[in-house]
Image (cartoon, rainbow, N blue to C red):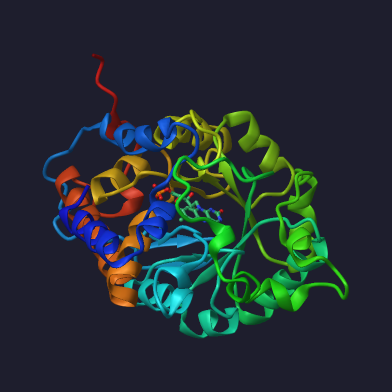
């Protein structure tokens, strides 16, 4: 892990009520998937090239038509107002200042109009709610507000049982939980039933979301080649290889191990993003070499947010991007597009 991230994590821990720090840190079950995530990136070894005029590499990328200064983006995470007063508005400003992609959660606690006003390029992460009118209303709203894609989280038919139970969603003030979803509740609906995860979400929902929004729909949580194909065949415009930061199915395969088969299954047809345990530019470089088009950070962004608001979010994204730029140069890659599958190996033990 980059030292600056470690420092921000320590400052976040000092700033937050211990229960809320645990809410950020926790994994599911025995936290096997959580523990393995970061280690799996570090198993890989790089194969640098010499004399490639790569001393000032570019980290710029384009994703689904959006130009970004860095392939390092902000993963969707919920409830930012419990971590910092300005909540998702601060996160949006930090990502914008870093030239990074922002994915805003369905469980955002700041009003989305304010988040959109502070944001650079941003996408909405979608949880399918039992009351479909609620999420479909939110999707219609973000289309108007300028979101340029949807990320449908596919790994959460229900919420996994978390290991650390100090604080959780149920402790988030109700007004914040309904800050955005509340506007779209049908008259007379039980709000807590209507906003809960829909256990019956299916592949058919990809096409439905694309149809009602007119936006590209990525699917988040894909960990296997056959699923990657099934999602793309059902209309997905991109994939996010993720095990939800080890918070859903414990012992789910590490994303560093799942990424190659997913990337291979779609072979450049759609962009592949990845998250889970990425804590440095070297981790990001390994991910790019294994077939990712971009990487997303969950907890590190929350450490930055809790420690230092928008500036802390920017610090995290800038630090990982600077580390990636140095690693690209030393690998002999003049840009992200120059990184190739054979730049990385897993040494035999
Ligand atoms: C506190 C917290 C809240 C999260 N909330 C959401 C969410 O609302 N929607 C979602 O799709 N994923 C959510 N995730 C998962 C992240 O999008 C991402 O998959 C994960 O955090 C990546 O791993 P990392 O934290 O090791 O970087 C959350 C993760 C954390 C840590």
Image coordinates for residue 85, horizontal then vertical, percent? 41, 79
Image coordinates for residue 294, horizontal then vertical, percent? 42, 52
Q: Residue at x 66, y 72 (%)?
A: 178
Position of 98 with respect to 120 (left or right) is left
Q: Looking at the picture, does residue 236 appear above or below residue 136? A: above
The reply to whether residue 237 is in sight is yes
The reply to whether residue 321 is in sight is no
Q: Residue at x 75, y 50 (%)?
A: 198
Position of 187 with respect to 52 (left or right) is right
Task: From the viewer's side, name the closer residue of 175 and 151.
Answer: 175
Q: Looking at the picture, does residue 290 appear above or below residue 10? A: above
Position of 30 with respect to 349 (left or right) is right
Q: Residue at x 14, y 46 (%)?
A: 330
Image coordinates for residue 241, horizontal then vertical, percent? 51, 42
Task: From the viewer's side, name the closer residue of 148 and 132.
Answer: 132
Q: Residue at x 70, y 36 (%)?
A: 230
Q: Looking at the picture, does residue 155 appear above or below residue 76? A: above
Residue lying at the far top of the rendered structure: 349
Image coordinates for residue 153, horizontal then vertical, percent? 62, 50
Q: Quadrant of residue 3?
A: bottom left
Task: From the viewer's side, name the closer residue of 168 and 196.
Answer: 168
Position of 110 with respect to 260 (left or right) is right
């Amino acid at each position: 892990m980059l030292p600056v991230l470690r420092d921000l994590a320590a400052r976040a821990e000092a700033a937050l009520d211990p229960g809320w720090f645990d809410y950020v840190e926790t994994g599911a079950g025995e936290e096997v998937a959580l523990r393995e995530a970061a280690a799996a990136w570090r198993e890989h070894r790089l194969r640098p090239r010499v004399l490639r005029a790569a001393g000032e590499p570019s980290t710029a990328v384009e994703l689904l038509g959006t130009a970004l200064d860095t392939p390092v983006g902000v993963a969707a995470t919920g409830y930012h107002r419990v971590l910092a007063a300005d909540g998702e508005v601060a996160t949006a400003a930090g990502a914008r200042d870093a030239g990074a992609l922002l994915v805003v959660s369905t469980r955002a606690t700041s009003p989305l109009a304010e988040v959109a006003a502070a944001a650079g390029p941003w996408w909405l992460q979608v949880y399918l709610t039992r009351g479909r009118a609620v999420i479909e209303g939110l999707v219609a709203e973000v289309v108007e507000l300028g979101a340029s894609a949807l990320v449908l989280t596919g790994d959460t038919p229900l919420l996994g049982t978390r290991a650390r139970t100090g604080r959780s969603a149920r402790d988030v003030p109700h007004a914040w939980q309904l800050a955005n979803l509340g506007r779209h509740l049908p008259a007379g609906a039980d709000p807590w039933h209507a906003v809960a995860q829909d256990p019956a979400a299916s592949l058919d929902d990809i096409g439905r979301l694309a149809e009602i929004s007119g936006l590209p729909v990525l699917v988040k949580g894909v960990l296997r080649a056959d699923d990657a194909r099934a999602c793309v065949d059902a209309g997905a415009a991109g994939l996010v290889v993720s095990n939800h930061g080890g918070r859903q199915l414990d012992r789910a395969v590490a994303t560093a191990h799942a990424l190659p088969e997913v990337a291979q299954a779609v072979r450049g047809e759609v962009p592949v993003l990845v998250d889970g345990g990425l804590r440095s530019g070297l981790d990001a470089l390994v991910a790019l070499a294994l077939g990712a088009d971009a990487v997303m950070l969950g907890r590190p962004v929350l450490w930055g947010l809790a420690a230092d608001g928008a500036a802390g979010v920017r610090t995290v994204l800038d630090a990982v991007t600077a580390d990636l730029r140095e690693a690209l140069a030393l690998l002999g890659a003049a840009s992200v597009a120059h990184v190739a599958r054979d730049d990385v190996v897993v040494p035999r033990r």
